[in-house]
Image (spheres, rainbow, N blue to C red):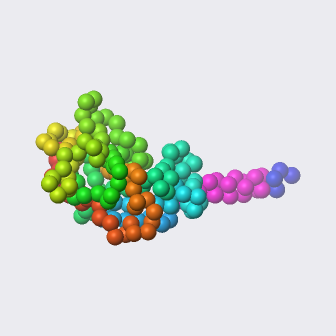
Amino acid sequence: MFRTPLVIATALAVAFGLGILSSIYALRATVGFGAIALGPWTAFPSAQTIDADPYAKAHRARDGKLLLGGAEGLTFTAATDSDNRSLSENCRYEIKGITPPARLWTLHAADRNGNPLLGTRPGLPDGVNAWSVLRNADSSFSIRIASTATSGNWLAVPEGRAPFLLVMTLLDTPTAGSSGVIDLAMPGISRLDCTDA
């Protein structure tokens, strides 16, 4: 008597459960389509536009983050250095080069979910921007990323062994449109050394 409804309820529970789990996996597996990679840096120029694919729209809804419009800017993220090694808090890095043309750019470290890193001591530089960075005569710059203080441009990360992302946002830039972004160059990320402790 209760066998048929029980079988139907079990089948529906399995179908809905697998559907939800596969949707969550698909959302975590990709931010969307149309990624542009410049060395270790990756950007999704159409993620914030009306033409964004369904995965990008779902990410936008799930994260609740305000994204820049197509004419306002472009956000690049890097999870690895220029030699394709994962970024880790127990290593020191150097970002060296120039950025594409932009009225302003910002750089900060984030966790793997894109949230700014917590745990750096108060008063330490947890972000760098185009107005505060010291430049060379040719407009290039060098920024050290480490948990211990260094001279020159320095971006502090917490002490630990956790992986992290670098997030560079170009504001009011002509590169926000996807045309011509392939020909641009982003600064390189070099690993200097690591602590094995």
* Vertical placement of residue 145 versus 186, above or below: above
Numbered-mark total: 0
User: Which of these two is toward me, 11 or 69?
Assistant: 69
Using residue 149 as the reference point, say whether residue 171 is left or right of it.
right
- Which residue is rendered at x = 50% and y = 65% of the image? 33
Image coords of residue 179 (percent x, y): 44, 68
Q: Position of residue 124 (x, y in %)?
A: 24, 34
Quadrant of the rendered image containing residue 76 = bottom left
Residue at image x 24%, y 64%? 83
* Residue displayed at 21% across by 49% down: 143
Camera-nearest residue between 1 and 73: 73
Quarter of the image holding residue 52? bottom right
Q: Is residue 143 left or right of residue 30?
A: left
- Residue 165 can be seen, yes or no: no
Task: Work out whether residue 60 or residue 192 is closer to the camera in this orientation and state it.
Answer: 60
Question: In the drawing, does residue 53 fall left or right of residue 112?
Answer: right
Q: Is residue 142 left or right of residue 117?
A: left
Examine the rendering and report whether any part of residue 41 can be seen. Answer: yes
Q: Is residue 21 magenta?
A: yes
Q: Quadrant of residue 100?
A: bottom left
Residue 184 coordinates in the image, percent (x, y): 32, 66
- Residue lying farthest to the right in this orientation: 1
Give how far across and how far down residue 85 sits, in percent. 26, 60
Residue at 35% x, 51% y is: 103
Above/below status of 46 relative to 196: below
Residue interval drawn in magenta? 6-26
Closest to the observer, 150 or 137: 137
Q: Quadrant of the C terminus?
A: top left
Q: Is residue 38 magenta?
A: no
Q: Which SS type dominates the magenta stretch? A: helix
